[in-house]
Image (cartoon, rainbow, N blue to C red):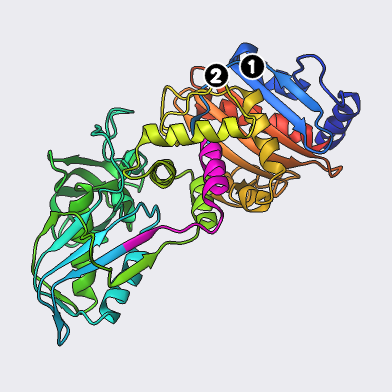
Amino acid sequence: MSRYLWFAALALSAPLAASEPFLPPPVESRLAHRQVPEAATSIYVQDLDSGDVVVRWNEDVPRNPGSTIKLLTTLAAIDILGPTYTWRTDIFALGPIEDGRLDGDLLIRGQGDPFLVTERVWQMLRRIRQAGIDEIGGDLLLDDSYFEVAPDDPGDFDRQPLRAYNVAPNALLMNYKVVRYWFEPVHETGKVEIWTDPPLPNLEIDNRLSLAPGACRGYQRGITITANATVNKMTFSGKFPSGCERYAMDRTALGHNSFAYGLFKSMWEESGGTFDGGWTTAAAPADEEPIVEFQSLPLTDVISRVNKFSNNVMARQLLLTLSAEILGPPGTEAGGRKVVGNWLRENGLEFTDLAFDNGAGLSREARITAADFGKLLRFAWRQPYMPEYVSSMSLAGLDGTLRYRMDSGPLEGAAHLKTGSLDHVAGIAGYLQARSGRRFAVVVLQNHTDIHRGYGDETQEALLRWLYEQ
């Protein structure tokens, strides 16, 4: 029997609504094959039109959702702030401007823009130049007081302090505080050239790499990277394979304000401006108007980047923004959790087993039940901003974190989903349209040893393929 006929036969025998706990046979089969206990899996599937619960299994067991919890953060944000909400970054000239020279300091006040990447910083600098400044005579002053972020060790989560996903939020976050390091062999000298994007004048590179014969493979291509205490000096060592033409690695560098200074100085001088000053932290003047009010992308664009690409620091920026906007600055994680909790209660979504933590899912403490998650998705489906919310999720087989999953066969393009994966955690949540036209809210949460090593993906796809035939 072909795969299509097999799934069709299962569909004919499947219940239209699950009055009792029920595991579809393909899901049972995958769990048994991988020796994953059925008790380690929670599933909740609801027909969005009828409200019938089609599949429920351990749906009331609180589990770690991984990055799927970003769907709660982004849903609260779009409902509370509105889909066209934007962040502002204000620029102040603290001195007179004559003949293109600012005789004083330039101050930048951040208000949490999650997507102030290098291209956007370039646009902001163009606005400053258009305000009549070519030369800055003083220092760069940085105001990141709109958020209050508790001191944290970026290596606490998984002992990977230089990984981009571990970057802490900041009101003046620039380029996620991430540098792309490029490595290219120079065969004539037996050395490896290193350059960075963006170039940062206050970041020191200690290149101890050597070239070794071999194919272009191996973990990090044999590169070991270490940083000093202030992360302003990066040391690269090891043997780089000669078979590599070029290799790129993204890692964090510097502190937030030091990064902002280095990026500003580099790009300002690249644009033809003059600036020889240093930087310090300072509060923006309360009695002056900014010379530039630089607006971010709208919230709908931001949540698409959060959900499709599972950007942790952007999700955390959203949570702090909710706190600052609703409770007043400075925004805090605790304040963000309070705002989201109040919003849930106001909308009749009281989740007693919810542990929200930082809103990004980068947590061992986060918890939610599959049933509560399903209620959240059905609530979102009935809201006027539903199209923007749904389109923020990865489209199966086509983009985001699902770009290379379900990219052939009937599921391609049939589901909008958010994935979640941590060590021993796997999950998906979102929406599926079946072959029949029925639409489902789907939640799968699995917590089990090594479930993140592909076993969870197999369970998820087995359920989605079965649902597609309903």
Q: Residue at x 89, y 28 (%)?
A: 9
As helix, strand or loop, the secondary structure at mark 1 comes to loop
Where residue 183 sits: x, y (%)? 26, 55
Q: Residue 27 or 127: which is nearer the viewer?
A: 127
Q: Is residue 357 left or right of residue 432?
A: left
Q: Is residue 49 left or right of residue 449?
A: right
Task: State the extent of the magenta-drawn residues as a range.
Answer: 69-89
Per the image, the residue denoted by label 1 is 60
Where residue 166 sits: x, y (%)? 33, 38
Check if residue 347 falls in the magenta segment: no
Q: Main secondary structure of the magenta part?
A: helix
Image quadrant where one finds the N terminus: top right
Looking at the image, is 318 positioned above or below residue 198? above
Marks 1,2: beta carbons within 8 A:
yes
Q: Is residue 140 left or right of residue 291?
A: left
Furthest residue to the front? 287
As helix, strand or loop, the secondary structure at mark 2 comes to loop
Check if residue 81 falls in the magenta segment: yes
Q: Residue at x 36, y 59 (%)?
A: 116
Residue 293 sits in quarter: bottom left
Looking at the image, is 447 positioned above or below residue 102? above
- Real-space Cα separation, disc 1 to disc 2, in angstroms: 9 Å
Looking at the image, is 423 positioned above or below residue 317? above
Q: Residue 347 or 179: which is nearer the viewer?
A: 347
Where residue 447 sits: x, y (%)? 53, 20
Per the image, the residue denoted by label 2 is 353
N-term mark: 1 or 2: 1
Tell me the kind of residue under disc 2.
Asp
Q: Residue at x 25, y 51 (%)?
A: 144
Q: Residue at x 58, y 30 (%)?
A: 345
Q: Residue 368 or 242: which is nearer the viewer?
A: 368
